[in-house]
Image (cartoon, rainbow, N blue to C red):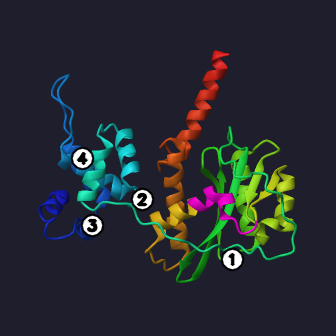
Amino acid sequence: MKYAWIAKHKKVWPITLSCEVLQVSASGYFEHWRRKDTPKPSKPGASKRISDEALLVHILAIHAEVKQEYGWPKMWKELLARGIRVGKERVRKLMKLHGIKARGKRKFVVTTDSKHNLPIAQNLLDRNFTPEAPNQVWTSDITYIATDEGWLYLTGVIDLFSRQVVGWSMRDNMQTNAVTDALRMAWFRRRPEPGLIFHSDRGSQYCSHEFQGELKRFEMKSSMSRKGNCWDNAPTESLWGRLKVGRLYGRKFATRREAMDEVIDWLNFYNHKRLHSTLDYVSPMTFGQRWIAAQQQDKKSA
């Protein structure tokens, strides 16, 4: 069996290299040994303490699955979510001992152009990043990704309540239609009630007559950050940091299509699986689903 061969020769060949040569996934390899090494108590009341060796396999499996995005705090929360009861200090020490850590943080350049004579909207958000329900506040921003074909520009729209990415677009330019496409996608997916606050920076794309006309058509209120203040749109800036550090840094993309596929894969991971510290360590989708379930339960109880 391929997994057995890899395990036998792991001191000679790196596991990831062996997996690549044998055409098996590294996450599948770790998951195989995780299931095999997980202790199964023979009777009620038996000890459920997992060995360091088995715990390490769990950690390596998760680390491979999330593409090295988690440090020890999120790793501990992920282990608990998967039913593995273990202390956080034990996870921290084991990861440190084996050199398992999240990708390092990096600074990224702002792409939007705010040097224009277009009208600027008032900052309605005023750093209130915790709305009480979905579809009350959306935030948006543009970032860029390098490929051998040239830049790929990504626009995202986030629902601040659950931090879910509800709309996006990817283009080879930074024209206004890039942001209008992301807005339309978000609107058609959510159909929010009138009065939603749409917050962005002062980039010319967001200030354009075309984009502001779309906001009025959807009965949304435009809100913009103060000049040169990235903290006024911190959640969206943070999203780009997670994407680039977690998935894009160190990668080389031959084509824009290749980069787009990677971004879409990460957005699905982010929305459905990635633990979010602001959401009490659940994914944006899980947070939103729990809120809906709670609202339905309240209606039944009323």
| Position of residue 124 measured from the top left corner of the image (x, y, whole percent) | 79, 52
- Give the label, 4 or 3, closer to the camera: 4
Q: CA distance from mark 4 to mark 3?
A: 19 Å
**Which residue in the rendered view is the most extreme toward the left?**
8
Q: Pick whichever of labels 4 and 1 is earlier in the sequence.
A: 4
Q: Residues within 10 Å of mark 2 (few under 14, many from 20)?
A: many
- Taking depth in this image into account, of 161 and 170 the one nearest to the observer is 161
Label 2 with label 1: CB-CB less than 8 Å: no
Q: Pick whichever of labels 4 and 3 is earlier in the sequence.
A: 3
Task: Say which residue label 1 marks.
Answer: 173
- Which mark, by number, is residue 151? none
Label 4 with label 2: CB-CB less than 8 Å: no
Task: Say which residue label 2 marks.
Answer: 69
Residue 231 among those drawn in magenta: yes
Amino acid at the residue labelled 1: Asn
- Taking the spot 19% from the left edge, 44% from the top edge, the residue there is 37
Amino acid at the residue labelled 3: Thr
